[in-house]
Amino acid sequence: MPGQKTYVVEHLDPECGPWSTLEYLAIAKECADARARFCLSSAPRDLHLPEPLRICKGLEIEYRSVEDVYRDPKHRVCLLDPAANEELSPKDGDDFDVFVFGGILGDDPPRDRTSELRKKGFTGRRLGPIQMTTDTAVRVTRTVIQQQKPYPTPLPSSTELDPLQAPLNAVPYVDYPEIRIDEHESTEMPFRYVKDAQGKPVMPEGMLDLIKKDSEKGFGDLF
């Protein structure tokens, strides 16, 4: 697993909504704790960042595209691609230094922003069959690449696993969790999340409050 790892999210919009802001803050903190880099690429020159992101020390802004920044060596760049034929595995930590997320994983319904990078020849890996939020996708990738353990294959059904140190097929997940808005209302999240020790979805700080506050608007208004 040579060299420092870099996690890149393509951010093509001039705005950064409250949902993305919380996701980016969580990614930046977790990457810094793991001694990894976190970068937004293809950022518009007129990108307006909320103050928490402007002062976030773990966030780098790159106005150039992934194709320009990582033109050489392209073979060390992994595109996290739902359409890829091969799933991410711990051995990819030896083959890749940069992991690129097309910015689609937190959209509902998904928009295929990875298609152009796919056509340009970047090697793809997928994170399983269920859509993840962007921070979850980065969290799972970083877990598999930087914190994996040599678990046996196949895994015994009774194996107790540390959710922060596991290969892709052993990370504990919760799919489509139900979020209680109040005593009369709840909403089902259309994503897969990492599951914490209490069986709850791992979300950025402040995300539950945001979901509850803006539940009547629909997810499209939050990004």
Image (cartoon, rainbow, N blue to C red):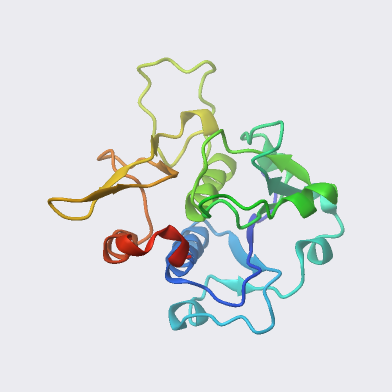
Q: Would residue 180 be visible to someone looking at this image?
A: yes
Residue shown at 16%/55% (left/top)? Answer: 182
Q: Residue placed at 51% from the left, 24% from the top?
A: 151
Q: Is residue 186 above or below residue 37?
A: above
User: Could you tell me if residue 29 is visible in this image?
Assistant: no
Q: Quadrant of the N terminus?
A: top right
Residue 62, image quadrant: bottom right
List x then y, in percent, for residue 99: 67, 52
* Vertical comparison of 156 with 149: above or below: above
Nearest the viewer among 23 and 38 is 23
- Closer to the camera in the image, 136 or 151: 136
Q: Is residue 2 above or below residue 53?
A: above
Image location (x, y in percent) of residue 98 = 70, 54
> How many numbered discs, if any?
0
Query: In the image, is residue 181 above or below residue 20?
Result: above
The location of residue 162, given as percent across then percent down, is: 39, 35
- Residue lying at 14% horizontally and 50% vertically, measured from the top left: 184
Q: Is residue 173 left or right of residue 106?
A: left
Residue 13, picture quadrant: bottom right
Provide residue 166's location: percent of width, then percent of height: 48, 34
Which quadrant would residue 141 be assigned to in this image?
top right
Q: Residue at x 49, y 55 (%)?
A: 135
